[in-house]
Amino acid sequence: MRAVILSAIVAAAAAETYFQESFGAGWEDRWVQSEAKSDLGKFVASAGKYYNDESADTGIKTSEDAKFYGLSAKFDSFSNEGKSLVIQFRVKHEQNIDCGGGYVKVFPSTVEGTKMDGESPYNIMFGPDICGPGTRKVHVIFSYKGENHLVKKTIACKTDEESHLYTLIVNPDNTYEVRIDGEKADGGSLYEDFDMLKPKEINDPDQSKPDDWVDETEIDDPEDVKPDDWVTESHITDPDAEKPEDWDDEMDGEWEAPQIDNPDYKGEFKPKRIPNPDYKGPWVHPQVPNPDFVDDDKLYSYSDFGVIGIDVWQVKSGTIFDDFLITDSVETAEEAVAAFKTLKEGEDKMRTAAEEEAAKKAEEEAAAAAEADEGDAEEEGDAEEEAPKDEL
């Protein structure tokens, strides 16, 4: 037991937090506004409409509609080789976002904050992205040898107006995990869920499907022939039609009886299908080792992390970012989840109270309006009774 406790203490002591930001006083000095575009949107400090503790819950909010945003912060360069990497942050789309990003990018230390833009090379991009009903997902993108590789599966993001905590864990065994609000949303293998490596095997270029390969499972029954009395004419001349007495061939042309649906019509004859006796099954292309395949047991590893940035476009502004954390300790991230849940409870409580108050106010206003209408109706009735009547 003592050894276990000692091991836990050593692990906790060895854990490192590379970056942490909750946007307290002086955050503007710690973050750099990009100058890559002249009309980038402005971030402002805000806890939003609902919060648990306004001071503690204040993050930075996008404040201008239809704008690109570019903001970044530096931290001491580090490599995640041989250890886990955890990227975590809180997002709240309080504006009921219609189209815009809520993700972050983690760059190498060589990226200059004033020049950061959509073309700046990053190591990892992670977080929610929403645009209409078609795009509602969590981006997980890894850069590998100069190319960005998006996760092949779709990981759903949250689309409501509440705070949510997004966590990405990347492990030295080349696995990853996405958590939302502290709960696992998805995960898997970097080998299987991303196309960073070329395939181990490829189709044998010297092989092709034989010309006589039969891959049709069924054929027409050669013994099933169309009956002699099979009727294929869909329409016939109406036998009850008669030429009108006033029909003038010279004036009206030659009279032709109208067509009607053929009651004996059976449709196009199709012989029944039977199993093909020559069927060989689907042809499988023989595989051979891919000469271009190069294995890599360090897909997860980057030699240099040093900048975190928010590089997004938003149609409708109002997204709040807060509680950034980059660490090599899953336990440290999980401790932050507890604080997030406290924040969420307070936020939900405040929202519920506001909604109840708004509903109560609406009921009172509706009741007052109804009472006023009733009073007006009574006054009109009294006025009609007091009005002088015409003398007969």
Image (cartoon, grey):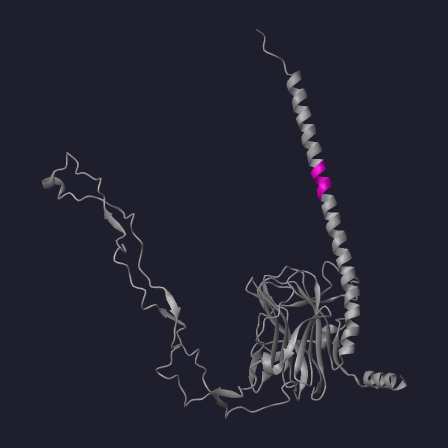
Residues in magenta? 362-367
Residue 13 in view (yes/no) = yes
Residue 234 percent across, percent down from the top left: 28, 52
Residue 331 percent across, percent down from the top left: 78, 77
Q: Is residue 49 magenta?
A: no
In the image, residue 291 sits, relative to residue 334, either above or below, namely below
| Quadrant that contains the N terminus | bottom right
Residue 36 falls in image quadrant? bottom right
In the image, residue 47 sits, relative to residue 363, either above or below, namely below
- Give the side of residue 7 with respect to residue 143, left or right: right
Q: Main secondary structure of the magenta part?
A: helix
Residue 101 falls in image quadrant? bottom right
Q: Is residue 365 magenta?
A: yes
| Quadrant that contains the C terminus | top right
Residue 123 in view (yes/no) = no
Residue 20 percent across, percent down from the top left: 75, 77
Q: Residue furthest right?
A: 2
Residue nearest the viewer, comparing 47 with 329: 329
Residue nearest the viewer, comparing 270 with 158: 270
Residue nearest the viewer, comparing 161 with 12: 12
Residue 207 falls in image quadrant? bottom left
Q: Residue at x 57, y 80 (%)?
A: 149
